[in-house]
Image (tube, rainbow, N blue to C red):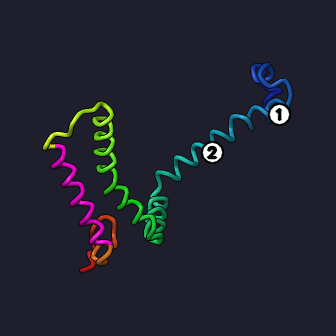
Amino acid sequence: MAIEKAPALKDVFPSFIYYVVIVTLTGIPILIAVGYLHFKKSSAYKAEADISFESHPHLKRILQNTENMLPLYLKMSEMMIKMSKNEKLSDKEIEEISLLQNELSQHIEKRLSGKYESNVYGTDNKQ
């Protein structure tokens, strides 16, 4: 064996069992990490993710709803902080809230009328 011919290896691996255990404990996690990175960077993963996203319409709807709701949540949290400090909202803040409400109303109208894009990226509109 190679261990017998190299005295330095004999110090690190006194027996074949130690060699197997050390290589297993270090080699397998390294191979898994390299495989995972390769899988994430390959175009097959990207295509699979696109197909999965297109085949589950609920994922598209959740994404669209979340993108519309996040600004509203942010503005509501700002309002709650002001109210907890007993501060009044300025006219500008009230106007911003009104704009957010209008955007949300338009989003709901598109949903109810069926005129919302079937594609998240807006490339094929239903009209």
Task: Name the spot of residue 56 as percent of width and height, x first.
Answer: 47, 69
Helix, strand or loop for disc 1: loop
Q: Which residue is mark 1?
A: 1
Residue 81, above or below 57: above
The amino acid on which the numbered mark 2 sits, given as a three-letter code, is Ile
> For the point 29% across and 37% down, which residue is it?
83
Residue 65, above or below 97: below
Of 26 and 103, nearer the camera is: 103
In front: label 2 or label 1: 2
Identity of the residue furthest to the left in this view: 91
Residue 47: name its quadrant.
bottom left
Of 22 and 98, nearer the camera is: 98
> For the point 85% across and 32% down, which residue is it?
16
Q: Disc 2 vs disc 1: Cβ atoms closer than 8 Å?
A: no
The amino acid on which the numbered mark 1 sits, given as a three-letter code, is Met
Helix, strand or loop for disc 2: helix
Which residues make up the magenta segment? 93-111
